[in-house]
Image: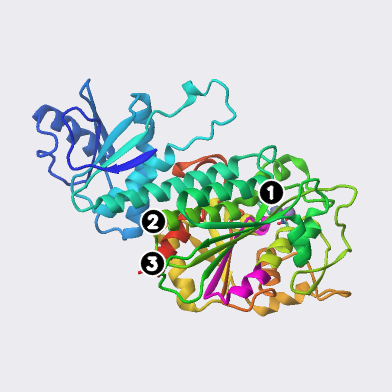
Amino acid sequence: MKIIKKKEIEERSNRILLVRKEQNLSEYVPDAKQRNYVQERLNLKKEVALLNQLDHLVIIRVLGQTDEPKNNRLEVARKAGFEVHPMLNDHDVDSVDVVNCGVEPEECVAFAEGLALTGYQFLKYMTGEKEKQNKLEKIFLVDEALTGDQVDKLNHVVKAVYLTRDLVNEPLSFLTAVQLSLEIEKMGKEAGFEVEVFNKKKIESLKMGGLLAVNRGSLDPPTFSILTWKPEDAVNKNPLVLVGKGVVFDTGGLSLKPTHDSMDYMKCDMGGAAAVAGALYAVAMNRLPVWVVGLIPATDNRPDGNAYVPGDVVTMYDGTTVEVLNTDAEGRMLLADALSYAKKYGPELVIELSTLTGAAHAAIDKYGIVGMGNASREVMDNLKESGEYTAERIAEFPFWDDYKEQLKSEIADLKNIGGKYGGAITAGKFLEHFTDYPYIHLDIAGPSYNKSAYNYRGLGGSGVGVRILYNYLLNRSI
Ligand code: BES
Ligand code: MN
Ligand code: ZN
């Protein structure tokens, strides 16, 4: 998919006209008979009308009302992009002009974003993929208020989401921890950010006990990837660090997950890692003047002859001892090491993303990100505003110290699970133990993977995290 700026429409180009409900259409639909037809459709409370001109399509699409809050209108526009996509596909349209006929430029961008994200497919493993392939390849934005640079930037963000989705959709049969690091290196080469990968030997020499404990049941080695985007004109003195959970498959380990409905989609357990890689890709492609570091600890979590077992005590990278009471609470083991490692950067802020708990999923489903942290009110509010702007919304949970009670162990500094209640928060509190900087934990267990198609977020990996992080970093850079 490519989104490109264009000055004006050609006579025969397929087009989508973005309008308001009460708009006079005479300028855009000159033929009176056709205009009557469109008006009739819209009067019937339909939001879309299609004029088949035989050698091209004209689609008139109504967007939100001006009295609605802007963020709502942007989401209406993205969803409108999603709704129009099948009409284009049915007519084998491979290129379309999106024309601003009286909406705000941001809504035009959001529409193109929704349309482009809807066009995503993961067909790598389909033989005879041609018939299944979506037709749309190019979206031309026709809006005088938008610069070519703005449109290119949108194009890169969409590409970042595509790459993130690809990573999530790749099964373990391809995407081992080592392969994940190789894919991240490829993304770094293309976008211009640096990637350093620690192999098992290096991880052992650093004594990253949490990551190594989870990896003990695996035949494949772990990796720890460090992604760096440090432009000369960076606005920040201390980096913003993004940490992503890279469990390339989570069987639960010896605390094995029951397979149906629980283990089946656990290839998605590196959704946080994929979002971090995607965010760095977008930031670097768009040359944002902000210093960002990504940390991605990766392994699969499996039962095996030498797998870590419940009752084990693990010495973590920072020296903390952890009593493992459930090997399925593995994400926090490797994330803890990455969070300790982040200290050496003296970061301004660390945002960590992970498909961490079923409890977060159970609490709010796929409709948002469960967020919590100890960063300032201002930082959290800015991040939440980015969430509203991109419709990757954060539901903020409390982060009270009371929850730490549940993590006390009889024989070690901490145990890796809490009690029956507040599971999303006790997981966050466990992670906070390994930080000494402003910290935000985003649990994306709910929205990271769609078992059935969910609007422009699609089927399978949704790429959640990329757009909220990009928008936050964009705002931080200006
Ligand atoms: N990867 C899972 C969490 C998850 C659940 C992700 C659903 C995506 C969708 C995580 O490693 C896990 O197994 N968490 C356990 C923790 C428990 C053992 C304390 C859980 O939530 O059940
Ligand atoms: Mn698990
Ligand atoms: Zn997991």
Please state if 13 lies on the left or on the right of 76 as rendered: left
| Location of residue 340 (image quadrant) | bottom right
Residue position marked by numbered label 2 in the rendering? 286
User: Callout 1, which amino acid?
Assistant: Ala
Disc with the residue nearer the chain's start (1 vs 3): 1
Q: Secondary structure at mark 3?
A: helix
Disc with the residue nearer the chain's start (3 vs 2): 2
**Which stretch appears magenta?**
339-359
Residue position marked by numbered label 1 in the rendering? 177
Residue drawn at x 61%, y 47% as measured from the top left: 182
Disc with the residue nearer the chain's start (1 vs 2): 1
Front in this rendered view, residue 347 or 65: 347
Dot 2, how many residues are within 10 Å of its Cα: few (below 14), some (14-19), or many (20+)? many
- Image coordinates for residue 341, horizontal then vertical, percent: 66, 69
The answer to whether residue 462 shows anywhere in this view is: no
| Location of residue 440 (image quadrant) | bottom right
The answer to whether residue 100 shows anywhere in this view is: yes
- Image coordinates for residue 197, horizontal then vertical, percent: 64, 56
Residue position marked by numbered label 3 in the rendering? 475
Q: Is residue 353 magenta-colored?
A: yes
Residue drawn at x 42%, y 70% as measured from the top left: 234
User: Callout 3, which amino acid?
Assistant: Asn
Dot 1, how many residues are within 10 Å of its Cα: few (below 14), some (14-19), or many (20+)? many
